[in-house]
Image: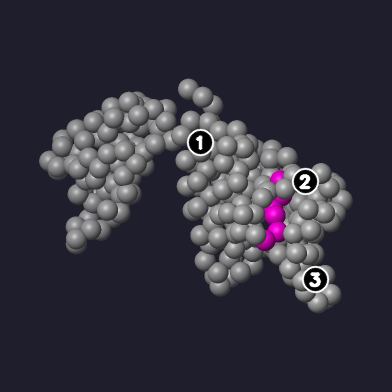
Amino acid sequence: MSQSVTACVIVIGNEILSGRTQDINLNHIATTLGGWGIQVHHARVIPDDEDIIVNTINEVRGSYDYVFTTGGIGPTHDDITAVCIAKAFGVPIVQHPDIEERIRQRPAPDDVMASRLLMARVPEGAALIDNPSGGPQGFAMENVHVMAGIPRVMQAMLSTLEGELTTGPVIRSHTVRAYTGESSIADALALIQQNHPDADIGSYPFLREDRYGTHIVIRSSDVDLLRRIADAVMEAVQDIGETPEDLGLDADASA
């Protein structure tokens, strides 16, 4: 089996931590990367604080194959991500001519243009991440990819990385629904997990049509293994007198 490729997502912004803005970027990044064969293994939400950003980037960039950040690359005083990434890598911050050219295509008064040009700042040596939405580009330093916080812009940037990154096996899921509490099958699931260490088995309680139940989700890149484990889970549910529902591969458990 191919070795897994891992990622860490850093969501940057005081507005996320305050609750004023609800983050939806993590979900999109994790889903998109997972479909490419890159598994998000870690995520953090951090404030617009230079020391925290620098320390966080330096902590995680050596632990994961890729780091993706969102937020803090706009034109205002609190958009400090580019400066922090430069500091983390120990390089100067520079104004990238390609981003500057794109920004200057939209005329503006001098003071407004000066603010906009803050978005042209990148660490020296950075590679650009295209922005099909038409705005300024993001950038990458080694394995750290820096993108906008606005969801539609971030999604546009991320889409341009498809096929450009090292990928591993795509993780699939197989879901079994059982109208029983987690505790009633906990021991059986623990044993099944112990016997199949190459897969991940999770149980998630739900309430549906006034009935409590549990979704058992099995995750692996090996579809045959998923089928075998699903059969074992179905048997375990039947052993306690319940009738399981096999929702199959990549099922939406909310359905």
Query: Where does the image place residue 78, in percent across and percent down from the top left?
Result: 73, 68
Mark 2 neighbour class, 10 Å CA radius: few under 14, some 14 to 19, many 20 or more:
some
| N-term mark: 2 or 1 | 1
Q: For this view, does 49 lie left or right of residue 251?
A: right
Q: Which amino acid does label 2 sit on?
A: Ala
Q: What residue type is labelled 3?
A: Met
- According to the picture, the residue beneath numbered tag 1 turns out to be 37
Query: Where does the image place residue 71, in percent across and percent down from the top left?
Result: 65, 60
Q: What residue type is labelled 1?
A: Gly
Query: Where does the image place residue 194, in percent across and percent down from the top left?
Result: 37, 29
Q: Which region of the structure is painted magenta? A: 135-140
Compared to 62, does 51 lie above or below? below
Compared to 101, does 43 lie above or below? above
- According to the picture, the residue beneath numbered tag 2 turns out to be 126
For residue 113, which numbered disc appears in the image? Answer: 3
Give the camera-side residue of 90 and 98: 98
Query: Where does the image place residue 184, in percent across and percent down from the top left?
Result: 23, 44
- Which residue is drawn at the image coordinates 61% and 69% (left, top)? 15
- Which residue is drawn at the image coordinates 30% and 49% (left, top)? 253
Mark 1 neighbour class, 10 Å CA radius: few under 14, some 14 to 19, many 20 or more:
some
Q: For this view, does 30 lie left or right of residue 181?
A: right
Please say whether residue 139 is one of the residues in the magenta stretch. Answer: yes
Determine whether the residue tagged by mark 1 lies in a helix, strand or loop.
loop
